[in-house]
Image (cartoon, helix red, strand yellow):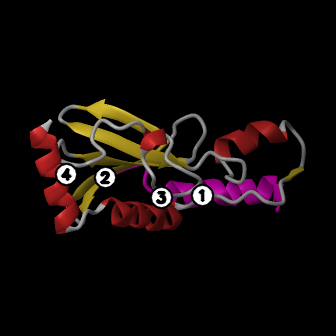
């Protein structure tokens, strides 16, 4: 992909139409989407309740397939927040590209793509699908937790 000053202007216009922050619920899971203020990429987080088997687990210990991998886990009030970002080796972060151009007319990054809200929402749904436990897993988890 050859990124020119003109294409960067178009990308910035596209981004203005997207959300910078959104909260919602999907299949019973609370989620948050937010744009990184310095880099420009989208990040996505799910809030897990205390009864979830991944509550208080580090993101490296959660076997979930999502864009590259999970990159975040942290306590938020009564929830455990896990998430991923779109700042990897093939992700185009608009605010970073602008600074890399540094006065040049174009910059060549053949494999980079901007991960838009449509991409992030699809990955979120895939993540939530992997988080859902069937009734037997829920029962085992709750019984095991009470026996501890």
**In this figure, what is the number of numbered marks?**
4
Is label 3 in a helix, a strand or a loop? loop
Residue 13, label in figure:
1
Q: State the separation of the CA atoms marked 4 and 2.
A: 23 Å
Residue lying at 67% horizontally and 52% vertically, measured from the top left: 91
3 vs 2, front mark: 2
Q: Is residue 66 left or right of residue 94?
A: left
Start and end of the magenta stretch? 1-22
Give the quarter of the figure containing the C terminus: top left
Query: What percent of the width, then of the height, locates residue 144?
Result: 16, 46
Residue lying at 57% horizontally and 50% vertically, measured from the top left: 86
Quick one: label 1, few (<14), some, or many (20+) residues within 10 Å? few
Residue lying at 15% horizontally and 42% vertically, measured from the top left: 145
Q: Nearer the viewer, residue 106 or 58?
A: 58
Q: Is residue 104 above or below residue 141?
A: above
Sequence-first tag of 4 and 2: 2
Write down the residue under mark 2.
31
Q: State the separation of the CA atoms marked 1 and 3.
A: 9 Å
Query: What percent of the width, then of the height, locates residue 20?
Result: 44, 48
Write down the residue under mark 3.
18
Sequence-first tag of 1 and 4: 1
Q: Say which quarter of the image contains residue 11.
A: bottom right
Q: Is residue 23 above or below residue 120?
A: above
Query: What percent of the width, then of the height, locates residue 73?
Result: 40, 37
Q: State the separation of the CA atoms marked 4 and 3.
A: 39 Å
4 vs 2, front mark: 4
1 vs 3, front mark: 3
Residue 141, label in figure:
4
Query: What percent of the width, then of the height, locates residue 68?
Result: 59, 53
């Amino acid at each position: 992909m050859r990124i020119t000053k003109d294409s960067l202007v178009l990308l910035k216009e596209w981004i203005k139409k997207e959300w910078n922050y959104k909260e919602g619920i999907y299949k019973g899971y609370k989620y948050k989407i937010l744009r990184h203020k310095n880099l420009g990429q989208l990040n996505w987080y799910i809030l897990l309740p205390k009864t979830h088997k991944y509550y208080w687990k580090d993101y490296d210990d959660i076997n979930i397939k999502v864009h590259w991998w999970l990159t975040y886990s942290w306590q938020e009030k009564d929830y455990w927040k896990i998430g991923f970002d779109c700042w990897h080796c093939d992700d185009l972060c608009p605010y970073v590209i602008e600074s890399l151009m540094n006065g040049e007319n174009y910059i060549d990054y053949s494999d980079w793509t901007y991960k838009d809200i449509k991409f992030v929402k699809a990955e979120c749904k895939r993540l939530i699908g992997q988080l859902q436990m069937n009734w037997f897993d829920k029962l085992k988890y709750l019984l095991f937790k009470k026996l501890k």
